[in-house]
Image (spheres, coloured by chain):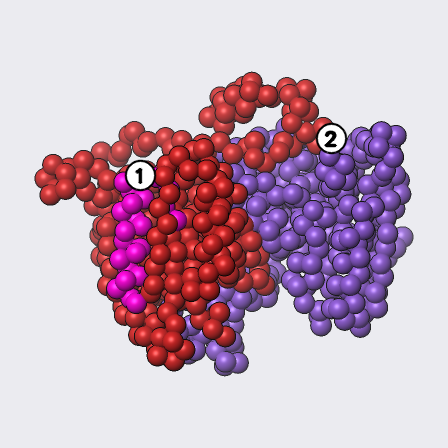
Chain colours: A purple, B red
Amino acid sequence: MLLIARKALALAHNKTIRLTTREVHCLSSILLSPPLVSLDLPENWVPYSHPPSSIAFEGEQKTVVIDGKAIAEEIRTKIVSEVWKMKNDVGKVPGLAVVLVGEQRDSQTYVRNKIKACEETGIKSVLAELPEDCTEGDIISVLKKFNEDTSIHGVLVQLPLPQHLDEAKILNMVRLEKDVDGFHPLNMGNLAMRGREPLFVSCTPKGCVELLIRAGVELAGKNAVVIGRSNIVGLPMSLLLQRYDATVSTVHAFSKDPEHITREADIVVAAAGVPNLVRGSWLKPGAVVIDVGTCPVEDSSCEQGYRLVGDVCYEEALGVASAITPVPGGVGPMTIAMLLCNTLDAAKRTSL
Amino acid sequence: MLLIARKALALAHNKTIRLTTREVHCLSSILLSPPLVSLDLPENWVPYSHPPSSIAFEGEQKTVVIDGKAIAEEIRTKIVSEVWKMKNDVGKVPGLAVVLVGEQRDSQTYVRNKIKACEETGIKSVLAELPEDCTEGDIISVLKKFNEDTSIHGVLVQLPLPQHLDEAKILNMVRLEKDVDGFHPLNMGNLAMRGREPLFVSCTPKGCVELLIRAGVELAGKNAVVIGRSNIVGLPMSLLLQRYDATVSTVHAFSKDPEHITREADIVVAAAGVPNLVRGSWLKPGAVVIDVGTCPVEDSSCEQGYRLVGDVCYEEALGVASAITPVPGGVGPMTIAMLLCNTLDAAKRTSL
C-alpha cells in the first residue's frame, strides 16, 4: 500500500508511473476510482522562477487601494453599539471561547489579536491554553465545556494543531451553533449547496466579499479566480463567490498554467500562502485583486526585522489592477471583524 | 422586501437596477453582504440563438465514444458477485429503500429503473409511494422507519419533490450512513473539504469520474469546466474533479461568456439540462466531453414519439472532441450502477 501511495505521489507530480490494475483494485474493489482521502497530496507550489524582465502596459491603470483597516474599523464601531444595545436590552453580552494548543508564535499572535478585539468591542472572551503534548481527549473535554456554557456563543480552535492531533475530529466537536469559524463540514456543505444557508461563513472569505461589495465590485457573472484551495480560505472563498453568481475557477499547486487562467479573471483572490506568487503579468488590466497572503519576510530595514508580504507582487500589481488590498491592512483586519460579527450573530440567535 | 427580491432578480439578469444602501441594510444590519439564500435565483439559461453557420477544424479529430452502458454492465456484474458472496458469507443482502412522492412520469420511470436494477443484482428494494398532496410529516415518518430498519442500508428520496414540501428539511432526515445519493449537506461538506472523506459521493458525478478514469483520462492538472451547478450534479461534480486535482471552473446561467471558458477546457462536463447548449464551437479540439443532459425532444420518426437529447450538440462534437459520452447510453447507466455500488458499500460497512 505504501508503494501505491508513492506511485500516486509520483503521478501527482506528473511523473509517468501508473498504478497497475491490481494495485488500483487494492484501493477499491469494484471501481477504478480510488478513495478520496488517498488523493490529498500536499500543495507544493512551484516558485515562480523566471519573472518577466520588464512589464509594459499601455495606458497605465489607476489602482484604488482598498483600505481594509478602515472598513473593519467601521464595522467594529457598529458591533460595539450592537453589543452595548444587547447588554442594555437583555442583560447579556456575546461570548467567544478560543482554544489554543501549544506555543507556536504566529498562533499566539493571532489569538492575542482576537482576544484584544473582543475586549475593545465589549465581547466577553475566554482563552483555554493547552500544552503542545495534550491529547485529543483533553481538547474535546474543553470543547464540551464551552459547547454547554450558555454564556459562550462562539467557540474556535486556533489552527494549525500539532501533528499528533486529528484536526477533523476536533473541529467536528465544535457545536454547530457556536462554529463561528465556519469550519464544520455541515456549515461548509450548506455554504456549497444552493437553497441552503450555513449558520456561519468562514471569517476570511466573508471579509473578502464584504470588501468587494463595499468597493462597489459587482460579482454576478464576473470571472473570479481563487488561487489556493485550503479548507479555511480557498475552498469557502470559491463557494461563497459562486453563491454571488461569479463564474469561479480554482487554481492550485497542480494547475498547469495558473498565470493564463488568472489573466482571464475580473476578480483575483490570492490565498496560496506563497509570497509574491502572483506577478503583474498574471493580471488582466483592470482586475480587482484581493490578497489574503501574509508571510513574514526578513527585512533589516524594518523595526521588527521583518515585513509582511502578500501572495501578490504589490508593486507590479499597482498600475495593472483597478483595485487591490494592501498587506498588511487589507484582508487581515476584516477577518477579525468578521469573527466578531459571527460571534454577535451567534449571541443574537440564542436570544430569540 | 419583495421589491428588493425583484431588484435582485433584475440585477441577476444583467439589468442595471441597483439596491440602495437602505435596501441592503434591510437584508443585513452591520454588513452590506446579504443573506446567502436571498441570492439563490433560478437558473435561466439563455438559449444559444446564433449557431455558427459552419464549423471548420483543421485535421479532424477522431472521437472515441465512451460506452457507458457497457462499463456500467461490467460494474453491475461485479456487484452481482459481491452481493452473492455477502449472502453466502454473512447471510444478508444489501437493501435499498426508495421514497417516491406524486405521479410525475419521469420520476416514476427513474424509480422503476432503480428498482429493476436492484432486482437484477440481487439487492433487496423497498418502494414507498406517497400521494402528491402528502405532508412533510408523512415523508419524515416513512424515512424514520427506513432509517431504523436494519435490513435497509440505503435510503433515497426521488427528486424533485412537489413544491409544497421542504426538500432541504426532508433530505436532512435521511440517516447519514444510509444517504446513498450523497445529498446530505454533511456528505457534501466532507466531499468539498480536503482531508475529509464523505460516506457517499453522489451517483452521477461518481459515475462521470469513473468513466473518465476508465477512458484513460488523467485528471490532475487538467482544465475542467463543469456546466451547471445543481446540488445533485454540477456542484458535487466540481468538488469531485477538484479532489482529483483538476483545475475546475464552474459555468452557470449567469456566466458572461460560457463558450470562451468552455473552449479552455481539456475536460467538459455538461450538466445544465439545456438540450444542445454546448455547440461544437464551444469545444477545444481534443477535449473530453461528458454529457449529463437527457432531455426528451419530440421526434415522430422514433417509436416512442420522442428521442433523448443531451446538453451537447453530439453531431458537432464528433470530430472535435477526443472522446464523448453518448445520450442515451453514456452517463445514465453509470448513475444507476453507482447507486448500486453505494448501496453495496453501505451494507458492507454495517457488516464490519
* Residue found at x 85% / y 38%: A92
Whether residue A277 is visible, yes or no, is: no
Residue at 58% over, 44% down: A191
Q: Report which residue position mark 2 lands on.
A: B30
Where is residue B260? Give x, y as percent. Answer: 40, 40
Secondary structure type for disc 1: loop
The residue segment tinted magenta is B99-122
- Of residues A188 and A3, which is closer to you in this image? A188
Looking at numbered disc 1 in the image, what kind of residue is underneath it?
Answer: Gln
Q: Residue at x 63, y 31 (%)?
A: B34
In the picture shown, does residue A295 fall above or below A119? below
Task: From the top left corner, tell me how far across and down residue B263 is, in percent.
Answer: 37, 45
* Image spot of residue A76 (x, y percent): 81, 35
Tell me which corner region of the image, top left, top right, bottom left or bottom right, holds residue B30.
top right
Q: Main secondary structure of the magenta part?
A: helix
1 or 2: tag closer to the N-terminus: 2
Q: Is residue B105 magenta?
A: yes
User: Is B154 placed above or below A320 here?
Assistant: below
| Tag 2: amino acid | Ile
Taking B263 as reference, is A118 left or right?
A: right
Q: Nearer the viewer, residue A294 or B199?
A: B199
What SS does tag 2 mark?
A: loop
Residue behind mark 1 = B104
Q: Residue sitting at 26 percent across and 57 percent down?
A: B116
Is any part of residue B129 visible from this angle? yes
Direction from residue B5 to residue A295 in the image, left or right:
right
Q: Is B156 situated left or right of A124 in this image?
A: left
